[in-house]
Amino acid sequence: MDWRSYVGFLGLLLSMSVLAHVAHAAGPSTRHAFFPFDRAAEPGPFPRPSLHAWPLFEAWSRELPGETIRAWAQTESVTPVVWGDKLLVGSSRGRDVLVLDRRSGAIVGRYRTRAPIEAQLVFRPEADALFVGDTEGFLYRFSLDGTLVWEYESMGPIFAGLSVGADRVYFHAVDGTLVALDAESGEEVWGYRRQHWYSDELPILGGGRPLEVEGIVVTGFEDGSVVALNAADGRLLWERTLVSDGVWRDVDGDPISLGDGRIVVSAQDGPTVCLNLETGAELWRIDAGGVGRSCLHEGRIYLAGTSGEVVSVDVESGNIVWRWTLPKKVLPVSPRIWRGSLLVPASNGLIYFLDPNNGSRQWIYRTDVRPMGFSAPPAESPGAIYIVSNGGILYALRTLDYDPPRIPVDDIEWRERFEGFWVVSLLDDGA
């Protein structure tokens, strides 16, 4: 081609790039379906999808409002919450819990907070409650209509470890204290701190979510220990040291109840142990570690290890059933079972689908977030998943046969009826 054609071609490419950026910044975008194998990302054969494996397509995506707060560690650690025809999303980029239309990605409401959100939202529709902790140290209880029921101010940011029991709200404070609030009033009931240990190695970003079972609260700490406390008064029932030395001793895995008086908890670099809930006696142990919430499904636990592998463990014997290793320097995110496959987002921006029985790779979905990748698992519905990248892009990925619910027309008439909750816009998704 001559030089005029060449310059014109470059101009066309530049225009397309600018338009794509503006579309992400302005609001939701939609894309056509495409085959989800990424041949350029990894070498080797790519198996064809099995009969229960279905291509996904990007129904829409949108950049969440705000900007990066911590440039040294740009992560999005909050999993969206599916609420009927809506989606609840918190982000480290900006304040407020956003309410989005699941079909279009349009922002239709907000729950007001003072600061960005990095702790997982706790959604309790049966109690008409949404619990939110922000990075300015405020913890809120909202009713689902947006009414602020109460707020509690802690001594520092709430980054992780937020959970709700029968009538308590628990979170890990920045000084390592586990704080328990009354779920109805928001008043502090008790606090527990590991008095014999101190570290200046930034424990504020760690901490698994406490688990309350049968009046007992189980949680891990940055000194490598796991403890059980009385939920009523915070009295120590038992403690056990999982890791006594090493650089990363944090017990960051969310404890899991097996429903039969046993719990499983993981330290960041290992081990993963099964303990008796009442006594703390160790029942089995494996060397693999994990962070976040592991997946319990049909007698197996699936761990996302910090060593770059996914591990399947039989809960009865503690035997490792299989291990699946990701590419070098790639870390998995907490796995989920979805439509018969084990869904594993990763730090390289890919979403892997494994056979949960043997760990074989079924197929791969590639997003355009490399190298930012993912740090939090997706929210799932029967035919769609919703996931936020570390770059602050929310993706709605659907199967070809799924039609999500629409927001009723009557809901469009909401206008500042409740404190902190209102309709911003409701865009036509063209469907």
Image (tube, helix red, strand yellow):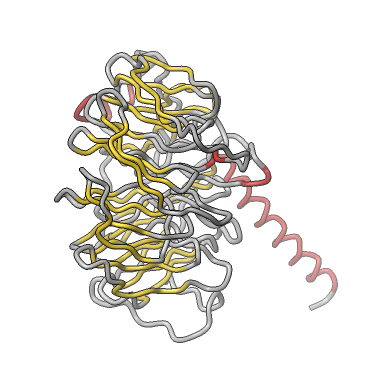
Q: Residue at x 23, y 45 (%)?
A: 279
Q: Residue at x 41, y 16 (%)?
A: 151
Q: Residue furthest left?
A: 260
Q: Residue furthest bottom?
A: 45
Q: Closest to the observer: 112 or 140?
A: 140
Q: Residue at x 37, y 63 (%)?
A: 56
Can you tell which quarter of the image residue 411 is in?
A: top left
Q: Is residue 400 visible?
A: no
Q: Closest to the observer: 80 or 196?
A: 196
Can you tell which quarter of the image residue 323 is in?
A: bottom left
Q: Is residue 363 visible?
A: yes
Q: Residue at x 35, y 16 (%)?
A: 186
Tally of numbered discs? 0
Q: Is residue 90 left or right of residue 226?
A: right
Residue 13 x/y as whole percent: 70, 62
User: Which image quarter is the N terminus in?
Assistant: bottom right
Q: Residue furthest right?
A: 3
Residue 270 x/y as whole percent: 44, 60
Residue 34 x/y as whole percent: 43, 68
Q: Is residue 31 left or right of residue 9?
A: left
Residue 333 x/y as whole percent: 44, 57
Q: Residue furthest front?
A: 196
